[in-house]
Image (cartoon, rainbow, N blue to C red):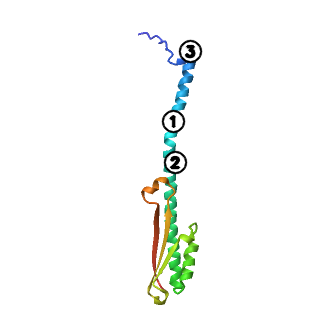
């Protein structure tokens, strides 16, 4: 059996007369199509990126609120009669948060605190999402942490 080399037929449009013009038109169409695809996908990708950043901020803020409540409770266990100092300790521990929006509640009242009794420090902070679609879960979300310690 003898094999003959098959002659390849050019499939590229540039081998035909006027084919180069056709190639340019096709490449312009493809560039236009890529631009349309980018215009459709870019807003979706930006929303996803903003959502990831927002949830990162949300978890960081939650951890900070819990840490601040723990710090206030630790201080309150040793110095139970000083609510102002407990609040200052909470505000100092809440790094990166607006201290004016922090709500600190200490229970029970200073006159009722005794050694061996429980002291509760409750910290609340309103978190605001920046992602436009976060309005589906509400404009603001209240983060709170309560820590109970025994007065020493």
Q: Residue under circle 1?
A: 36
Q: Is residue 33 visible?
A: yes
- Kindly report the distance in space between the C-alpha atoms of the residues bearing marks 3 and 1: 28 Å
The residue lying furthest to the left in this view is 1
Crowd tier of the residue under label 3, counting other residues whose Cα lies within 10 Å: few below 14, some 14–19, many 20 or above? few
Assign a secondary structure to mark 1: helix
Q: Residue 90, located in which quarter of the rendered image?
A: bottom right
Residue 80 x/y as whole percent: 51, 85
Q: Nearer the viewer, residue 81 or 140?
A: 140
- Kindly report the distance in space between the C-alpha atoms of the residues bearing marks 2 and 3: 43 Å
Assign a secondary structure to mark 2: helix
Assign a secondary structure to mark 3: loop
Q: Residue under circle 3?
A: 18
Q: Residue 15, located in which quarter of the rendered image?
A: top right
Q: Earlier in the sequence, mark 3 or mark 1?
A: 3
Q: Residue under circle 2?
A: 46
Residue 133 x/y as whole percent: 46, 53
Q: Nearer the viewer, residue 24 or 64?
A: 24
Q: Quadrant of the N terminus?
A: top left
Crowd tier of the residue under label 2, counting other residues whose Cα lies within 10 Å: few below 14, some 14–19, many 20 or above? few
Numbered badge on residue 76: none
């Amino acid at each position: 059996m003898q094999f003959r080399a098959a002659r390849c037929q050019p499939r590229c449009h540039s081998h035909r007369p006027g084919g180069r013009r056709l190639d340019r038109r096709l490449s312009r169409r493809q560039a236009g199509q890529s631009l349309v695809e980018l215009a459709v996908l870019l807003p979706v990708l930006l929303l996803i990126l903003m959502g990831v950043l927002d949830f990162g901020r949300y978890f960081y803020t939650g951890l900070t609120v819990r840490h601040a409540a723990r710090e206030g409770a630790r201080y309150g266990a040793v110095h139970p009669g000083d609510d102002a100092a407990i609040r200052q300790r909470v505000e100092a521990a809440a790094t990166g948060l607006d201290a004016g929006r922090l709500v600190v509640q200490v229970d029970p009242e200073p006159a009722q605190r005794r050694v061996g009794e429980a002291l509760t420090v409750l910290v609340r902070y309103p978190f605001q999402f920046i992602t436009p679609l976060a309005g589906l879960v509400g404009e603001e979300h209240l983060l709170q942490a309560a820590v109970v310690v025994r007065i020493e």
